Structures are given as C-alpha cells and as structure tokens.
Image (cartoon, coloured by chain):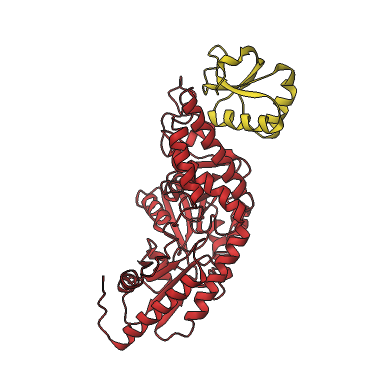
Amino acid sequence: MKWGGVVSFYASEHAMRSERVLQRMGVPARLVPGPREISSNCGVAIAFVWEHEPRVVQALNESKIRFEAVHRYDLHDETSFP
Amino acid sequence: MSREIYLDHAATSWPKPDVVLEAIRDFLENAGGNTGRSGHRRSIASSRAVSLARERLTDLLGAESPDNLVFTKNATEALNLAIYGLAVPGARIVTTSLEHNSVMRPLRELERQGRCSVEVVSVDGNSGELDLDEWAALLGAGKPCLAVAIHASNVTGVLLPIPAMAAIAADRGVPFIVDASQTAGYVPFALSGLGASAVAMPGHKGLLGPSGTGLLYLAPGVEVDPLIRGGTGSQSELEVQPDFAPDRYESGTLNAMGIVGLGAAAEHLREAGLDRIHASSTSLGRRLRDALAGTAGITVHGPDDPAGGVGIVSVSIEGVPCATAARLLDDESRIMTRAGLHCAPAAHRSLGTAPEGTLRLSWGLETTEHDIDVAVEALRAIGERGRSGEPLRTVA
C-alpha cells in the first residue's frame, strides 16, 4: 500500500485510539514511526491514503481525539508497524 | 474440609475473572514493551493494549472520553492527585464523617501545613443521611472551597446522597471530589452524570483488576497539577511536563500488565451488567440482614434496606472482640473477613464503634447464597459462645 498522508500526535495514546477508530470505520490506517521532519512529538503517527483525508480528519474530530497535524507525506508499507 | 469463603471484597476482590489472568499473561508474552516509549513492535503492542483498556473502562464507567481517565496505582493516589490538585491555598475543605484515611490524611496534612482548613459534616453511618443545609452553608460562605465525599461507606456500605451533594457544590461553584472506592464496578452509575469534578476509583475492588491499579476521572475542563513529573514518551525535547491528558498525569513507566488486566475485567463487567451485579449484591445483603435480624448479641450496622448500600455489612458481637471473631471465622470455618477500624476512624466514631471497630463482611461477584448462609451460621455460633462466656480458643 502506498500511503500519502500522516497524522502526528502529541500523545501515543491518541495515535493508538486513532488506529482503532479508523480501522473500525474500514478506513485503511497504519501506525508508523513518526517521521522526524514532521514532528518531534510522540514518536508514532498514523499513515493513511491521502484520498481519505477528509474522512480521517472528520473521524478524529468526531471521536474528539487530539492530534497535532495532518501532513502530506509519502510512505511505503515497509516503514509501518506490524 | 469446607471450601474457603472470601468475604473481604471491600479490601480487594478475589478471585479475579479468568480473563484477567489470561490478559496479563498474554500481555507479558506477546507485548511487554514499554508503553508509549519506543517504536518497536513490542512497545507498540503495549501501547495498543493500554489504550484499549482505557477505552473499555471509559465505556463501562460512562466517562466522556478516554482522556478523562488517568491511571494511578490505587484510589489513594487518585485521591491525593485530586485533593492536592484542587485545594487552592486558603481553601476551606468540606468533607464528611464517613471518610477513609485516604481522604482524611491528605486533608489533615493540608490543615497541619496551614494551607487549608477542614470542616467535617456529620453523616449517619447507618442511614447515610446528612444535613444538606449544613453542607450548603459550608460550601457557600464566600471563600474558596473544595468538597470531598465518599460515595459509599467502606464500614457500613451505606450510599451517601452524592447527586444532591454534587448539585449543591455545582450551584456554589465548588469543585467536588468523590471517593468511589466501594461503588465502582458494583453500582451502576455514569461518571459523566455524577456531577463530580473528580472521581477516584481503585482498579482492584469492584472493578476486578489486579492490585496496583487505580483510576482518577477528571471531568471535562478540570485540570490539576500532577503529583509527579517525569518521562512520558511525548515532547521529549522539552524539560517541562506536557500539559495534555493523559501524559500530564502519567509520568514514568505505567503498570501496563495491571492496566491490561483491569481492561479485561471491565469488559467482563460490561458483559455481566452492572445493573445485574448490583441487584445480585443487594439480594445477598438482604439475605444476610434478614438472617441476622433479631439474633441475640449481634448488632448489624448499616442501612436497613440493602438497596441503599453496597455489598458490605459491619457487625458487632456481644462479648467477642471483633478481631477474635475474625480469627475464629478464618481458623474454624475458612471465612475471610476484616476486623477493626478499616482505615476509617472518623466513620467508627460516627457509628459509636470506635475504638474497637467492627467485623466487616463484604461480598462480590462470586459470592453465593450458600456462602452467606454458612457465614450466618458461623456468626451465630460465635455469638452464642460469646454470650455463654465460653473461652474463645481456636483450633488452627
């Protein structure tokens, strides 16, 4: 899978919760090590397919999950967590 | 040999559901990394497991968001976090005569340091009634205040009128801390609907998690200074504490295996249903009270109607010190209870049972009607021996 977007977080708790929320909605999402050039925060980020960006942002807002920022960022599956 | 009968659930629940043991084992085998720290698979697996536990507890307890639940090592730590966080200098702290030392000791320390004054409103330990006008008057006297009350007495099990007390505190703009040590997991209530600013809960009593777990609920908008500061895995470039929950309050490595066990217990309780659990507990309480009612030499403390309390009964036996009664029950009948003051000297003074204390029987999810019947017979027999003046030796 080619991921085109990344959400960064302040707390890893919020990254974990986002992964569950998105997966339950059927939106492809993977936890990835947070790229350093994007954020110095919690260390893990959520990768998603860029075309789903509106749904991802809406889902996180509706779930009241605090996130730092949404980034356009190219990633490939070898950098995601199992 | 007769089977063990564990009637000390108010101290800690036992046994824990199998799913708790399995979850802890699974966590240690298949996760085991440090939560929220490293980026490797075992650290991520730990983070996922702790996050899921927080979500399950949020669902069970009716908090607005998982961010409103802070993991602590017990209810005492949760109470200290809330009390020290919400007691502004010069505040009058209003509390009740049924409090446990986990509330009274932090309050008396603030008083000793000259940082706050403490006012204790008398509560009837049997009925749970208090003078709400007095409560209101003390909370509305034109100075910063903080209110702290126990949800149900750990000595008699009686429930206090928390919704009415919370409404008064809210009306006066006074933060209200509730000690739900004996109600979380036993009484169906939603944290979001309790009207409290903060609610402290142990993970290892009614919530059926392992020891070393506790929770503090902070209502939306309520922020307190953390008790401790340190590493959180987040904002590592900063030498100041993060300002967001839960990291702000959860410095240092979490008791992740305990939390994961607690999360499994929460799911178990959700499936069992807190309404059903409370109804079953009330039924056992009625059976115990009815059986002991009118028994010569045995005084039962607490609410007449068990629906007004939780799964706790305190008794006094004429001619038998409560510590002796507890020892006889354990030695002769393998019935485990707790004697003494239950860390709540003020409550016993209210009941008139200080300094001797009482014999406390507290039941839980696995307690059966037969267990209660066996305990009643054993209590009656001990009462008879006390009244007859028979020496109270025990056979080990």
Quarter that holds the C terminus of chain B: bottom left
Q: How many marks?
A: 0
**Looking at this view, is B30 or B70 the one in front?**
B30
How far from the left and from the top, in percent, is residue A54?
74, 23
Q: In which quarter of the image is residue A4?
A: top right
How far from the left and from the top, in percent, is residue B390?
27, 85
> Is residue B325 rendered to the left or right of residue B303?
left
Residue A71 vertical placement versus B145 (above, below) = above
Rendered colour, chain B: red
Residue A19 vertical placement versus B273 (above, below) = above
> Is residue A37 rendered to the left or right of residue A57?
left
How far from the left and from the top, in percent, is residue A64?
66, 34
Identified at 61% across, 41% down, the residue is B220
Residue B395 vertical placement versus B232 (above, below) = below
Rendered colour, chain A: yellow
Identified at 49% across, 25% down, the residue is B41
Identified at 74% across, 26% down, the residue is A55
Answer yes or no: is residue B115 visible. yes
**Looking at this view, is B18 or B378 the one in front?**
B18
How far from the left and from the top, in percent, is residue B252?
41, 33
Q: Quadrant of residue B299?
A: bottom left
Residue at the extreme front of the image, as rendered: B1
